[in-house]
Amino acid sequence: MPTVRDPAGGTSTWRVAASARRSGSPRPVVRPVVRPVEGRGTTGPTDPAPAGTLAGMRGRRVGWAVAAGYLLGTTPVADLVARRLSGGAVDLRRSGSGNPGTANAAQVLGARAGALVLAGDVAKGAAACAVGAVVAGPVGAHVAGTASVVGHCYPVWTGFRGGKGVAASVGQCLATFPAYFPIDAAVAVATAAVPGWRRRAFAA
């Protein structure tokens, strides 16, 4: 009997009925008999994973993205820049406003220090989004970016005393919602241009 490969993965044997072989029969009558291939079936390895298992895997990946984003956010960029430029003589947490951020770094150590702190904080917010995207896709990018801002503001290494999170949130915005960045930048420039608001920014 001729044997053909069934598209579903089994083997079909086409049996010609005895009645079809009688003389005068207009055409043979065939009946397919499908035998499942080993390893295929309701419990085979090719079956899709249960919905609960997939949801659990996604949840774990999002959790890892949050953890990675938070840890990146706790990177003490301002402290590292201050230590590098002052040879360890200046602690931004004990100088100026006491805030380890761009404004205080610029006020205490100069514009170059402020620019370096700004670039570093923006970069770590964007990097957190990139890592989150690799770990858990678009959702991971958003939650990791948010977690990096939280890590910047509340780093576990310094007793949850950190910066204001403005630059880190800019990095998140650039990575996950770049269309909003011009608006964010315009607000920052307008704030810096108003003397009263500028003093408040340095005080923060």
Image: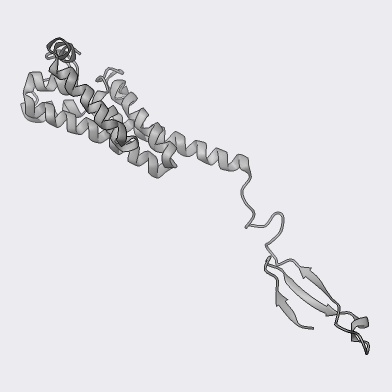
Above or below, 29 relative to 143: below
User: Which residue lies at the image location 83% right of the left edge and 78% below the top edge?
Assistant: 15
Quarter of the image holding residue 174? Answer: top left
User: Which residue lies at the image location 77% right of the left edge and 69% below the top edge?
Assistant: 34
Q: Quadrant of the N terminus?
A: bottom right
User: Which residue lies at the image location 39% right of the left edge and 34% below the top edge?
Assistant: 142
Residue extending farthest to the top is: 196
Quarter of the image holding residue 122? Answer: top left
In the rendered structure, the answer to whether residue 23 lies left or right of residue 133 reads right
- Colour pattern: one colour
Residue 38 at x, y = what percent?
A: 70, 66
Residue 13 at x, y = what percent?
A: 78, 76
In the rendered structure, the answer to whether residue 197 lies left or right of residue 70 reads left
Residue 96 at x, y = what percent?
A: 12, 13
Above or below, 97 relative to 49: above
Quarter of the image holding residue 118? Answer: top left
